[in-house]
Amino acid sequence: MKNDTFPEIQSVSLSSFIDYTTSIWDIRSFYIIRIYVSSSA
């Protein structure tokens, strides 16, 4: 029973971790592009 449920929990936490990191990278890249555009303009 444990062996069946563990990979399921692991995959869910992994996908949520990927979503979390990609959202952080979207925000970071947005600010970096914004700073770059304002500094070069």
Image: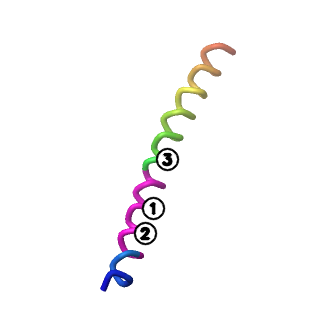
Q: Earlier in the sequence, mark 1 or mark 3?
A: 1
Q: Quadrant of the C terminus?
A: top right
**4, above or below 34, in the image:** below
Judged from the image, the secondary structure of the residue bearing numbered disc 3 is helix
**33, above or below 10, in the image:** above
Colour pattern: rainbow
x, y (%) of residue 12?
A: 38, 66
Number of marks:
3
Determine the CA span between mark 2 and mark 1: 5 Å
Label of residue 40 in the image: none
Determine the CA span between mark 3 and mark 2: 15 Å
Quick check: 34 left or right of 18? right
Q: Amino acid at mark 3?
A: Thr
Label 1 belongs to which residue? 14
Quick check: 33 left or right of 22? right
Label of residue 11 in the image: 2
Label 3 belongs to which residue? 21
